[in-house]
Image (cartoon, helix red, strand yellow):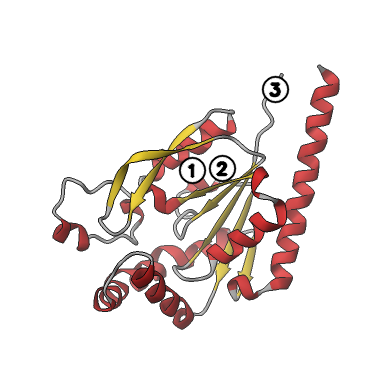
Amino acid sequence: MSILKPLIIGVAGGSGSGKTTVVEHIVNAIGENDILLIQHDSYYRDLKHLSFEERNKQNFDHPSSLETELMIRHIEALKEGYQVEIPIYDFSKHIRKEETRLAEPKKIILVDGILIFTEKELRELMDIKLYVDTDDDIRLLRRIQRDIVERDRELEHVLSQYQKHVRPMHLEFVEPTKRYADIIIPHGGENKVALDMVNALIQDRLNNYTEEIKNESKSE
């Protein structure tokens, strides 16, 4: 029996653009039983060998800060029907935790991250590429709220990081990848029309997947 390949969807966009809202909308519409969510943030390189002060100085918005090659290997393994061990990252300490998350193949693999379109090898694994486009001032406000509340950062540190790393890296690496997107979603999760179109497209692909399963069963 041949392995039916999962539908791989990439959701990119600047930090604070509303990617999480878009991802949640897709998961709620399709159903979490059929979706495996993989976040690029989980693949930040482990910085245990550095002091905490040195870790804080790192540029986490540059593509080199992420072990994208491991993510690629994991997605390729999932496509072939294998389980993988996804890293769990501690954002307050900038290190990977000892434990990992066991992930099993599902009909849809949803890949989320600001830099997922920068690597050609990763892009080429995706069947549908979505880019969430939101104004800079809104993204900054969301970034501040997230980093202070969820990642235990000080406001001064968040603003300094934004000026030194986030904004320059967005302009150099994130914004240019918009051209690789199949669908651009303006205004992020607030754009209900665009989200409905995306969900309809995914549902159509999922229906085709179900038909393939039926045909596979009949041919056995």
Crowding around mark 1 (Cα neighbors within 10 Å: few <14, some 14 to 19, many 20+) is few
Q: How far apart are marks 1 and 3 (CA)?
A: 24 Å
Q: How far apart are marks 2 and 1 (CA)?
A: 7 Å
Residue 42 placement (x, y as % from top left)? 40, 49
Look at 57% across and 63% down and name the residue there: 131
Instruction: Identify the residue at the far top of this view.
Output: 220
- Closer to the observer: label 2 or label 3? 3
Residue 110 placement (x, y as % from top left)? 58, 49
Label 2 with label 1: CB-CB less than 8 Å: yes
Q: How far apart are marks 2 and 3 (CA)?
A: 19 Å
Above or below, 38 relative to 59: above
Amino acid residing under circle 1: Glu
Q: Mark 2 points at which residue?
A: 125
Above or below, 205 relative to 63: above
Q: Mark 1 points at which residue?
A: 121
Crowding around mark 2 (Cα neighbors within 10 Å: few <14, some 14 to 19, many 20+) is some
Label 2 with label 3: CB-CB less than 8 Å: no
Residue 20 placement (x, y as % from top left)? 54, 63
Look at 54% across and 69% down and name the residue there: 18
- Quarter the N terminus occupies: top right
Crowding around mark 3 (Cα neighbors within 10 Å: few <14, some 14 to 19, many 20+) is few
Of pointers 1 and 3, the one earlier in the residue sequence:
3
* Residue toward you, 148 or 128: 148
* Mark 3: secondary structure: loop
Of pointers 2 and 3, the one earlier in the residue sequence:
3
Amino acid residing under circle 3: Ser
Q: Mark 3 points at which residue?
A: 2
Left or right: where 74 falls relative to 212? left
